[in-house]
Image (cartoon, rainbow, N blue to C red):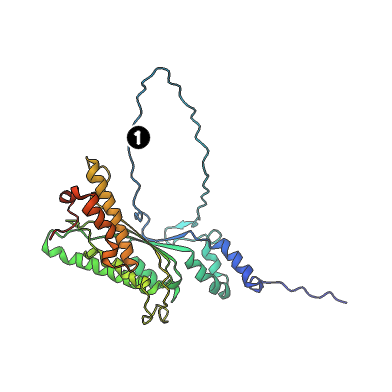
Amino acid sequence: MPAPKKTRTGFLDLPGEIRNYIYGYCFRPGNDLSLATAKAQLRPKPIKSIKLCETLVSDDHHPTSSKKSAGGQALIQPRLLGKYIRIHGTHTNWKTSLHALLLVNKGIYTEVLPLFYAATTIHTASPTRLSNFFTHIPPGAAAWVRKLELTYTTYGHAHNAHLAHFRTKHFARWTELCRQAAKLMVGLEALRVWVHVTASPLHLNLRERWVAPLLQFRRLTVPNANRKDGAGGHGTQNALLKHVKVELSSAFTHPFKWAHPGPETACFELHRLFGEAIARAMLGWSEKDAMVEWDEAWEETYKEWQHFLNFKVMY
């Protein structure tokens, strides 16, 4: 009798639990997608201080060993893009790219696409680039994004009246972007924003014009059954966005600006507390409840520096 033919088991023939286990190795949380140029500064640089050598005060100085203490090791495996041809540009090296898994067949593409967007953190500092991202991704894919990081720089004070319309366009563009992101990214779980304020004079108030674009994300934190999400369905009563962090900086937080530790400590602490107040307002808190810690620090802890910092308008 002829031997029975052996059937080959394909990847899609495996149980869904095993396929998800394999996908977990390929799409672990931690992938970053930066919608910016190569030289763009998406995160603030750490403060670098000058290290001074200590003067020897005794003759019996014995130098210590130059060996460094054993610490944790970090393994960095770059994903090579491949060869670069001047005419055609950069060619992706599919052997080291996770995107190759999306192009195997339609079945794997359908299963992998939500996992790919859910495991990727989106970074951007440009409203135009993020808007283009929403335009070119598959319909409904923005709802699978779980983490978003924004670098938001406000428009400076217009010294000339004929330049004021540029500031108006800047705030309008950022407001439009944040409204679009809040409407499409209905599955967003974590949001982090770096805000650099260039307004002059600087007032830390939730009613300031440059705060308004960020408050568009209240759409994701305040449940509304009558509101429709980006996929066409009605909004749920359980908001997913519960982790919001805002880090605020300005010319007052520039390193080595202050010669006295008093106003320096007050300035940095008030900036930190106001960033937390913005985050609470984005999570749906009322203005009074969101600003309670900042008001307490301003009126009590750092009251002696009010006339010097002038972060709050005195009516």
Picture residue at 25% right of the left edge, 55% below the top: 296
In the picture as drawn, the residue positioned furthest to the front comes out as 300
Q: How many marks?
A: 1
- Tell me residue 197's x, y (percent): 25, 57
- Tell me residue 53's x, y (percent): 35, 29
Considering depth in this image, is 83 or 8 the residue closer to the camera?
8
Considering depth in this image, is 102 or 229 the residue closer to the camera?
229
Picture residue at 32% right of the left edge, 36% below the top: 50
In the picture as drawn, the residue positioned furthest to the top comes out as 59
Considering depth in this image, is 167 or 92 the residue closer to the camera?
167
Q: Is residue 234 above or below residue 283?
A: below
- Tell me residue 304's x, y (percent): 18, 47
Picture residue at 36% right of the left edge, 80% below the top: 227
Q: Quadrant of the N terminus?
A: bottom right
Secondary structure type for disc 1: loop
Q: Which residue is tagged 1?
A: 51
**Residue 206 visible at all:** yes
- Tell me residue 123's x, y (percent): 39, 61
Q: Quadrant of the C terminus?
A: bottom left
Q: Is residue 110 above or below residue 92?
A: below
